[in-house]
Amino acid sequence: MSNPDDSIFRRLQFYTTATYPCSYLPGHMARSEVAAPSHLVDESAYARLIEQGFRRSGLFTYRPACEQCQACVPIRIDVQHFQRDRTQGKLWRRLQSSLTTRLAPLHWDARHFDLYLRYQKKRHPGAGMDQDDQAQYTQFLLTSRVHSELAEFRDADDVLRMVAIMDRIDHGLSAVYTFYDPDWRSSLGTYGILWQLDYAAQLGLPWLYLGYWIEGSRKMAYKSRFRPHQILRGGIWAESLDDN
């Protein structure tokens, strides 16, 4: 990585991990580039790293660094110009009247953890995350050195249906992770993104960062349905071809 001419980045080092099985493309091996030491990745540095395609998992800030594959493309949604399509509009109106939302700091809650395990077992079987214990879950989702918050979504009977964890930076929100009741209504994940777009608009933030998009991946296809969006290629954010 060629570091920007910025004192924050001159204090950081970047190392590449050993290979590990790719969680998105079966049969592929992946590597990540990690910013270190993690205690120097404060809110200012984190915001600049996100602009360059990095993500956060607990205290680790990383981006894909696969030598033979560049399939993972960072994607962000233009909050100010986003317009719901017909399907998204119907979903928004339906779930706005069905769910209430509460914001809170990151914290341990056994009900959140139970929902997380149910989500993993149903939506990502075999990935290993359904075997996470409390310590792994806490390290993955509840450990942060930046401005992170949690949104709870509950139905009319006060039953927890979804949890979204996000980071707030000076130029947007970063959607860290969302998990939900896999046996309730469909499209909760889509609603979670619509809600975060609305929240970012209320805060006056220009971008919602959705992590990585892989063309042709069924798991990732939903991200490109939020328009207009930009993708990062060659260090430059630009509108994708289907938005022109």
Image (cartoon, rainbow, N blue to C red):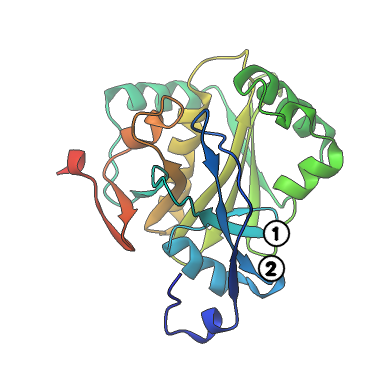
Q: Alpha carbon of mark 1 to alpha carbon of mark 2: how far?
A: 6 Å
Q: Nearer the viewer, residue 178 or 54?
A: 54
> Neighbour class for label 2 at 10 Å: few (<14), some, many (≥20)?
some
Which residue is painted at 71% across and 52% down in the image? Answer: 105
Q: Is residue 219 rendered to the left or right of residue 22?
A: left
Residue at screen point 43% across, 63% down: 52
Whichever of labels 1 and 2 marks the residue nearer the N terminus, that label is: 2
- Depth check, front residue: 68 or 3: 68
26 to 135, vertically: above or below? above
Q: Which mark is residue 59?
A: 1
In the picture shown, does residue 240 fall above or below 117? Answer: below
**Image location of residue 158, percent across then percent down:** 71, 24
Q: Looking at the image, can residue 107 be seen?
A: no
In-front residue for pair 203/127: 127
Report the amino acid beneath label 1. Answer: Leu
Callouts 1 and 2 close, C-beta under 8 Å: yes
Point out the residue furthest to the left here.
Answer: 244
Query: Could one spot residue 212 in this view of the protein?
Result: yes
Please tell me which residue is depicted at 63% across the width and 71% down the height of the picture.
Answer: 41
Q: Amino acid at mark 2?
A: Ser
Say which element carries label 2: helix
Residue matched to label 2:
38
Q: Position of residue 154 (x, y in %)?
A: 65, 27
Q: In the figure, residue 39 lies in which quadrant?
A: bottom right
The image position of residue 120, as x and y in percent, is 67, 25
36 displayed left or right of 114 = left
